Image (spheres, rainbow, N blue to C red):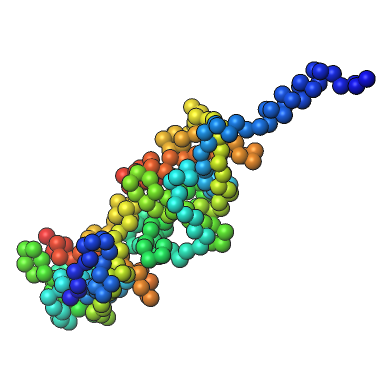
Amino acid sequence: MSETTLDQVLTQRRDARREIVNVDEPTTKLVIFELGGEWFAFHGDRIREILAEADVFFVPGCPSSLEGVINVRGDIESVLGLHELLRQPAAATGRGSSILLGRGGGMSSGIRVERVVDVVDVLQSAIQPPPATLPDHMRAIVLGLLRFQDKPVAVLDLDRIFADYAKGLG
Amino acid sequence: MSAAPDGGAGLPDRDAAVDVVVFRVAGHLFGIEAEQVRGSRPAAGDAAQTIEALLGFPAAPVGAALQLLTIKGGDGDWELGVAPPLELRRLPAAAIHPVPDLVAARTGLPGLRALALGADGLMVLVNAGDRAPR
């Protein structure tokens, strides 16, 4: 006679079912990146392209958070550093850093990040609302939080970031 | 001067070009559309308006050589002192770009009108026509 009980079989079946992701649950694409040792993300529909390297031309008269402009296949885009807005140490601009070409709030710009961690589809339910304990400077620009590879990731509102920056914030 | 932009596709005519008076200020390459410049002559003395003052850069050393550009203004011609050398350059339309949104919003540069990328880097095109000293 088998030593396996019906309860054991049913438990195994239930556990196996829990591991199956419900494919009908809505997902969203995120571009996760690192800045100052912390992880942030933009929604994938806000990022047109990820550039590994580009020569940045300084434009006189701009604040230090605007690195300059880059040539993207015959067009130019500005390059914005988020470190001041996010209160992070100045972003590295050397090897390994990347520029995300973003579009939001009717504007477009490159965004300097230290490293692109991953581009992933995540369940929308995995993104939690921002907690009330979020610092003031982050509250307006964080859409939500999730955990990815055991690290917290703040999903940022690119529309709001560009709009606020254009108004002189950050 | 240049050919008219191709209105159909919103892109400039392939052969279009703009004549620009090119000079350097504080190491940066600047240009003023030649159409805004009536003429040029060496300065006999100090200029009433210098390009450094116009753009918000520190003043050039006293006694430095100056070339006076006669700028066509809406309220009449006026003179702008620019340190030589100056160069008249024809910029292909494809090299000239509108100022990106965030740069336009945050620049502290008066009269910033366009940017151009060429072999010697970035050129900042400024509008001098309506920047006459008050």
Indicate the position of residue B117 as horizontal and vertical percent values: 35, 69
Indicate the position of residue A160 as horizontal and vertical percent values: 38, 40
Q: How many marks?
A: 0
Quarter location, residue A122: top right
- In the picture shown, does residue A55 fall above or below A39? below
Q: Quadrant of the C terminus of chain B?
A: bottom left
Pick the front one: B85 or B2? B2
Q: Quadrant of the N terminus of chain B?
A: bottom left
Q: Single out the residue that lies furthest toward the left.
A: B76
Residue B103 in sight:
yes
Pick the front one: A92 or B46? A92
Indicate the position of residue A49 as horizontal and vertical percent values: 47, 54
Residue visible at 11% across and 69% down? B72
Residue visible at 26% across and 78% down? B89
Residue visible at 26% across and 67% down? B12
Indicate the position of residue B23 as horizontal and vertical percent values: 27, 75
- In the picture shown, does residue A135 fall above or below A94? above
Left or right: A158 in relation to A116: left
Residue visible at 34% across and 52% down? B102
Pick the front one: B1 or A131? B1
- In the picture shown, does residue B125 fall above or below A119? below
Left or right: A78 in relation to A129: left
Q: Single out the residue that lies furthest toward the right.
A: A1
